[in-house]
Image (cartoon, helix red, strand yellow):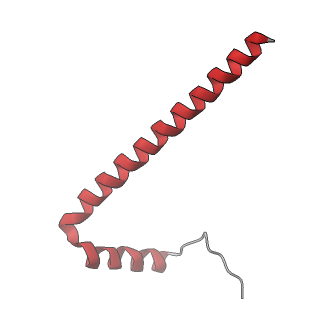
Amino acid sequence: MLIQPLFIGTWELIAIVAIFLLLFGGKKIPELMEGIGKGVKSFKKGVKEIENEVKDVDRDESKKD
């Protein structure tokens, strides 16, 4: 038996969406997606800030040499 955990087929995706609709209802889903979107945006902003800090430190260290 071959296990492919990263690949979701069409029917599995349909089942996940159907369960999601049953659990949260049609009115709650846009609110949930907005919250997820804000979370992803915040995460990307944090990653970008850390990358900039690392670049600044690296630049400062290269100037010292």
The C terminus: image quadrant: top right
Q: In this view, which residue lies farthest toward the left? A: 27
> Which of these two is toward me, 22 or 59?
59
Residue 12 image offset from top left, x and y in percent: 47, 79
Q: Could you tell me which residue is drawn at 61 percent across and 69 percent down?
A: 6
Q: In this view, which residue lies farthest toward the bottom? A: 1
Q: Is residue 15 above or below residue 47?
A: below
The N terminus: image quadrant: bottom right
Q: In the figure, residue 19 lies in which quadrant?
A: bottom left
Q: Is residue 50 above or below residue 30?
A: above
Q: Could you tell me which residue is drawn at 41 percent across and 42 percent down?
A: 42
Residue 58 image offset from top left, x and y in percent: 70, 23
Q: In the figure, residue 16 lies in which quadrant?
A: bottom left
Q: What number of labels is visible? A: 0
Q: Is residue 8 above or below residue 56?
A: below
Residue 37 image offset from top left, x and y in percent: 36, 50
